[in-house]
Image: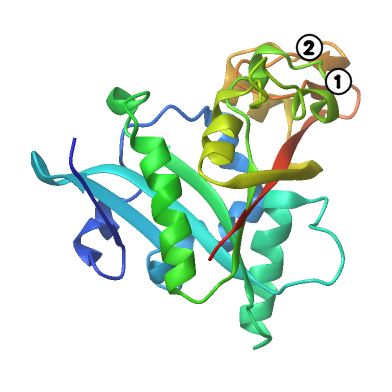
Amino acid sequence: MSLRITTLAERPEFASALWEMDHSWRVFMFNDPIADLFYPIAATDYADYVLVADDDAEPGRMVARACMIPFPARDDELPDDGWDGVIRQGWLARKLDRPLDAVSALEITVRKDLLGSGVSPAMVAGMREHAARLGFRELVAPVRPNQKHLEPHTPMTEYAFRPREDGLPHDAWLRVHVRAGGEIVKVAPRSMVIPGTLAEWREWTGLPFDRTGPVEVPGALSPVYCDVAQDHAVYIEPNVWVSHRLS
């Protein structure tokens, strides 16, 4: 496959199809309220931070997208609220006209029929190269380990730093980042917070949500906490901060 990776600003014809690509995301993942500060304006306000890819064999048909967001750098550690945090900080800084001197990856989505074909590493490389072109010295990423959902009760602090015999991370998606030059920094324990009524969670998952306590949801990295008496459930997803130093 010969990928052509460009920004949405360079290929605005992809804007209408940006969110229509066949994907493997679970429904509940689209219900983080903080996402509304980025995705509705991604094709306009952040077009130079969205990468789109097509294949020479099928020009004009999207293969993958990758989203980044600039945000204000902080002197202390990367935020514990990870994905939510960089979106919120980036949005506020734009509104208040404050410097946007750091950049974070938000997601890479590959067309479902092309998963495992090597597109994801190419998109990571594309993000690194584009962030460097924009003048950033570091690209950070609140990474969502793609095999963690198989161990929802394992603490992320244990899972993220688990090595294989060759020293690379146990998780396949973390390995992609490390092989690309990334370094695992820390866990973001509350990177995404997705609240909902029990009716909403039933609609999103097809599960009954009829008992108070932790509920294992397919695709979730940790259990969703259900409170029947209060008629709500909350998913708090931990992610893993990875730093890509750019030269």
Cβ atoms at labels 2 and 1 below 8 Å apart:
yes
Q: Name the amino acid, label 2.
A: Asp
Q: Which residue is at a point 70% across and 74% down the rendered structure image?
A: 72
Q: Circle 2 is placed at which residue position?
A: 210
Q: Which residue is at a point 31% across and 63% down the rendered structure image?
A: 8
Q: Quadrant of residue 119?
A: top left
Mark 2 and mark 1 lie on one chain; the one further toward the N terminus is 2
Q: Circle 1 is placed at which residue position?
A: 228
Q: Nearer the viewer, residue 27 or 201?
A: 27
What is the basis of the colouring in this image?
rainbow
**Left or right, residue 21 beside residue 31:** left
Residue 167, image x, y percentages: 68, 24
- From this viewpoint, is residue 110 visible? no
Q: Name the amino acid, label 1.
A: Val
Q: Which residue is at a point 32% across and 51% down the rendered structure image?
A: 18
Residue lying at the far front of the rendered structure: 166
Q: Real-space Cα distance between discs 2 and 1? A: 6 Å
